[in-house]
Image (cartoon, grey):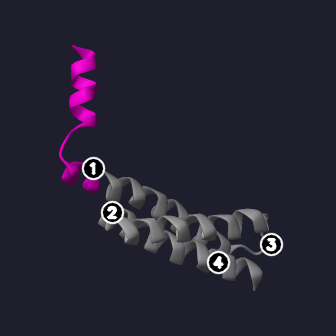
Amino acid sequence: MLRATWTHFLMSDERYWDIAGVLFGGIGAFALLGQLLSEVNRDAESTLSMSFLFGYVVVFMFWLLYGLRFKRPAIIWTNSVCLVLQSMIALVVLS
């Protein structure tokens, strides 16, 4: 019974996966927004590494291009927002 339920879930309508993609991508965006606000309000020097700052810029750029290539709105929207936020974090830390 559990196996049939899991298979049914994995094979469910693409719209549900798109909605879930936007929701979970939104969680990531809120996490980045929290980090951005933390960096803006920080009095001391940032402890974020350059590999984190620019590594995720590259990751979000790739997934944005992937979403554009395969026309996946959930991937496009969430990675666009995350790319902007991560880039802003990098700019705040570098300035």
Tell me where residue 15 sits by quadrant: bottom left
Query: Residue at the spot x=28%, y=26% of the render?
Result: 6
Q: Nearer the viewer, residue 50 or 17?
A: 17
With respect to residue 34, does 23 lie above or below? above
Q: Earlier in the sequence, mark 4 or mark 2?
A: 4
Residue under numbered circle 2: 74
Residue under numbered circle 3: 44
- Helix, strand or loop for the magenta stretch, by majority: helix
Looking at the figure, which quarter contains the C terminus? Answer: bottom right
Find the distance from the CA under tag 1 to the CA under tag 4.
34 Å
Residue type at numbered disc 3: Ala
Mark 2 residue element: helix
Residue type at numbered disc 2: Ala
Residue 60 x/y as whole percent? 54, 67
Find the distance from the CA under tag 1 to the CA under tag 3.
41 Å
Find the distance from the CA under tag 2 to the CA under tag 1.
9 Å
Residue under numbered circle 4: 40
Residue 65 x/y as whole percent? 47, 71
Residue under numbered circle 1: 17
